Image: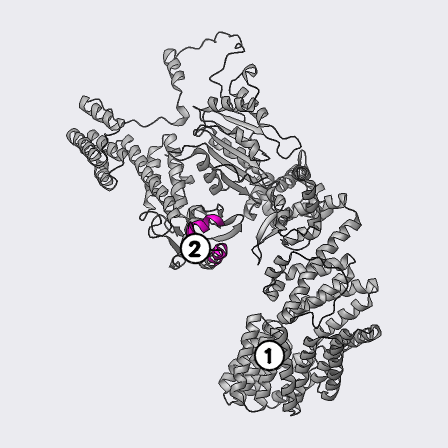
Amino acid sequence: MGDRSQELPDPSPLVFRVLGPLQVHGPVGPLRLPPGRQEVILAALLLEVNRVVSTNHLVDLIWEDNPPETARTQVQICVSRLRKLLAGADGEVSITTRPPGYVLHTDAGNVDAALFTTLVLRARRLRERGELHEAVRLLRDAVTLWQGDCLSGLDSGPLANKARQLNEERLTAVELRIRLELELGRYDGLVGELQRLVHEHPLREKLRGQLIQALYWSGRQAEALEAFRTTRRFLAEELGLEPSRELRELESAILAGRLPAPAAPAPASVRVPADKAEERTAAPEAEEEPEPTAPPAPESVRQDAVPHQLPAAVADFVSDAGQLAALEEALTGRPGRTTVGLAAITGKPGTGKSTLAVHVAHMLSETGFPDGQLYCDLRGTTGTPATPEEVLGRFLRALGIPGQLIPESLDERAEMYRTRLASRRVLVVLDDACGEGQVLPLLPGSRGCAVLVTGRARLTALPGAHRVELDVLAEDRALELLSRIIGRERVAGEAAAAEALVRTVGRLPLALRIVAARLAARPHWTLASMVQRLANERHRLDELTHGEMTMRASLSLTYEGLAPDDRRLLRLLSMAQAPTLPSWLAGALLDDRRPFPSDLMEPLVDVQMLDVAGVDRTGGFRYRFHEIIRVYAREQLAAHHTPEARQEALARMAGGWMHLAQQAHRKVYGGDFTVLHGDAPRWEPPDSYTDEVLADPLAWLDAEQASLCGMVEHTADAGLHDLSWDLATSLVTLFEVRGHYDLWEQTHLSALAAVRKAGNLRGTAAIRASLGSLYMSRNQFDTARQSLTSALDVFQALDEPMGEALCRRDMALIARTSGDDSSALELYRRSLADFDRAGDVVGRAIVLTQSAHIRMRQGETAEAQSQLDEALDIYEGVGYTGGRARTLRRVGQLLLEQGRSDLAVLTFTEVLELCRDSGDVIGEGHLLRDLGHAFVIMGRPDRARDFFDRAVTAREGVMDFSGGALARLDLARLLDAEPGRSRELLVPAVEVFRERRMGRELAEAERLLATGY
């Protein structure tokens, strides 16, 4: 019997079913799949689980010959919806983007089709070893997975073809199982099943033949002959054909009484070739030494040459069962395959491509390819890759062809090679291929042979190849590899250090093997000490070397094989500190303004020196480095570029970010309003890219937040002070709306240090003015006033009207908040004049809106209405939605003052929706309070209480504790019948008012507490 420890887990709780109607199971039962496109896409991904399915293929499945222009976008939408749906499925399931399409990642055992294939493959291996009972059991389990025809009910012509193929494989598995049961002598029990199968599949002659055999060996000779005659009549009437030769031979053997019962095959390990068996039969006891023979003449050919060229396998190999099963299937093939088995393993340097290939080759060498294994290092990443002629010469000699008989030309060598392998089962391993042109002449013509190729290029043009793209190890597998090399006890004793070590080398197999080998050679070293040695990026590659294993050498092979411009781009890209890299960066770094800058990135992706990280809003790809490759690229950057050249490239990169941030600000505000800019040059990405990516400018700013903030600090550190302060102040567009106060402060302090160091007065004033706005948003009014005053002094000295306008506007807001309305109105008057002098209409509208609030408080409703109307006209004219929302809020407050509460509530509700649509969480908190006040005035305390509650949650949810304290105070006023709840609200509010020096609010909160609240 087979090793039960190798069995698959019980397949009953499958997550995905395609062998029948398409089904997805979640924790509490089946998940409902929307019919149509999502079903088709999910089915296609499941049929190729853990393998890439191209977007073009998905488009063809849905629309076949006439896809719309938006087909790819619609596929993306469907995939996005599937991701949300599958979040509720059992097991770990994800759909990731991987060029040229998508991959559904899950354990192969979660998909009935993949589980079916694995069970059948395992059964075939057991049969080869003579373990028929186990093989039959696995085949029964495999067929039990079926619940009807594959993908029944799904309307897709191309998918129907794939479904028919799987249906055929199901019948093939049934026929194999019946054949094995016949070999085990289970004749009687098979007759009824075979009669049913023949009725369901009347054209399958193999089933009819098995029925005839089962009847005969059950002692039912007459019925066996009648079954043959019935078959003959049926084929003649339906198809006009005679039964096959095999069926006719069955009839003859039955009539002659010479049909022997089938015998189980001998296990593969004891089989002997027929010619050798005859020799052993002839002389079973011969023990004398054979006669010495002369070497063959030059023209003789050794027909019995069996090459075994594989390098030694790695003992501590960490395997992925699904990956191994898929490679085995691709190489050993299915019944009826007519082409050579072909698989390609690709991946970045150090991911273990060669290790996996050699492991698989050894695994299949005895059972799958008994006639030998050929191996050649094609040297694809060296300066002198092996030529096909050279490799064919080596292989022909290994196959017994003397050197004198090997032809000179490539075509003749390939012809002789294919002829030599035509009747053999040989596995060819081609390691480190540089491209398809090197591999194609080395493919055998025989379907019994297989070829396993490795390479850093993706080798997408190899016809019919199964592709495996290796990535870094999962953390658990990386720790397992470390444990196998240095010992489990050592890893368990420093578990945290082991995890840190795995992360430091980026879970890259080669790097991990190197550090593990060093630790194994030095048992007195701790894992923590190794982590510390690797912590210094400048020396990390020096540490990643042991004996002949060196990470730097592995990366150098790929690097040196790149074209000069690709090497230059790789070096310059290493300066980028963003988590992912948009394609336009390549154009900026090389100062190349081509319309599709991703074309510059793709050669680096092809050789795995860059990864594709995802897709941006334009549908273009984003890229990222593996950390060790980035370290190597930075080494090369330092070696090949002067500091001046690096500074120029960095300035172009930062100029590109600056251009996009400035354009985003313009789209939000309707122009270059309410912001100062520096004079540093911009680098403009293609217009089409800019237009697409900034279709929703706030969404772009959100998505690129980490990259933009990182660039502020990077330019500050590099001395590009003009770009640093300009980018920092432009990002206030995002910081203010989203309430990112910490990022606002962090970026501005970095830029402030740079401009001060450079003596940049204008930049220093701009940053201090912006920090004044930040401190004001935090209700730190004394600090804000100091910052704004110092900035205003510089702007006045420089005669900078925009700077003066911004400072006076914010100083007016501080005066207004402290109750000094007359000073506020005077500052607003002067700010209006400054904005008019600067030609900034949006700045004017902001001042009008803010001063209107004072007019409302003073009862000057007509003047307030006039100012608000003018502001709204300006915002409508430039298309600034945020400004319109803020002004409409003041309109709602004015309506409330005028006693028009119903209309005020409608206005507040409209503005609340505008804030939510734009993601303005600060504005949302304000509007919730406004609605609460409106419902208090309308005498509806329950509704008011609900809105105040939501305002507390909204403001404190974004760490706006002063806004939250104001909403707490509002709520406490309503809860006079609930003193315990009121006290709970007021105590933290008092602390905030005291800390923020909000005197008027503090006095009221303390009064309420003192009166028994």
Disc 1 designates what residue? 926
Residue 710: x, y in percent?
69, 59
Decide whether the magenta segment is chiefly helix, strand or loop. Answer: helix
In the image, the segment drawn in magenta is 55-80
**Disc sitting over residue 791 in the figure:** none
Q: How packed is label 2: few (under 14 Cα within 10 Å), some, or many (20 or more)?
A: some
- Give x and y (percent) for residue 836: 74, 78
Determine whether the residue tagged by mark 2 lies in a helix, strand or loop: loop
- Horizontally, residue 480 falls left or right of residue 181, namely right
* Residue at image coords 48%, 28%: 444
**Can you say whether 997 is above or below 939 in the image?**
above
Whether residue 978 is visible, yes or no, is no
Q: Earlier in the sequence, mark 1 or mark 2?
A: 2
Q: Which residue is mark 2?
A: 90
Q: Please count the marks in the image.
A: 2
Amino acid type, label 1: His
Q: Quadrant of the N terminus?
A: top left
Say above or below: 159 vs 719: above
**Magenta stretch encompasses residue 935:** no
In the depicted structure, whether residue 429 falls above or below residue 41? above
Q: Position of residue 785 (x, y in %)?
A: 76, 78
Front position in the image: 370 or 1005? 370
Q: Secondary structure at mark 1?
A: helix
Quadrant position of the C terminus in the picture: bottom right
Three-letter amino acid code at the position of disc 2: Asp
Do the CB atoms of the residues marked 1 and 2 lie less than 8 Å apart? Answer: no
Q: Quadrant of residue 4?
A: top left
- The residues bearing labels 1 and 2 have C-alpha atoms spaced at a distance of 42 Å
On the image, the x and y values in percent for residue 110 come to 42, 49
For mark 1, does the 10 Å Cα neighbourhood hold few (<14), some (14 to 19), or many (20 or more) residues? many
Frontmost residue, 3 versus 409:
409
Residue 233 vertical position relative to residue 931 in the rendered view, above or below: above
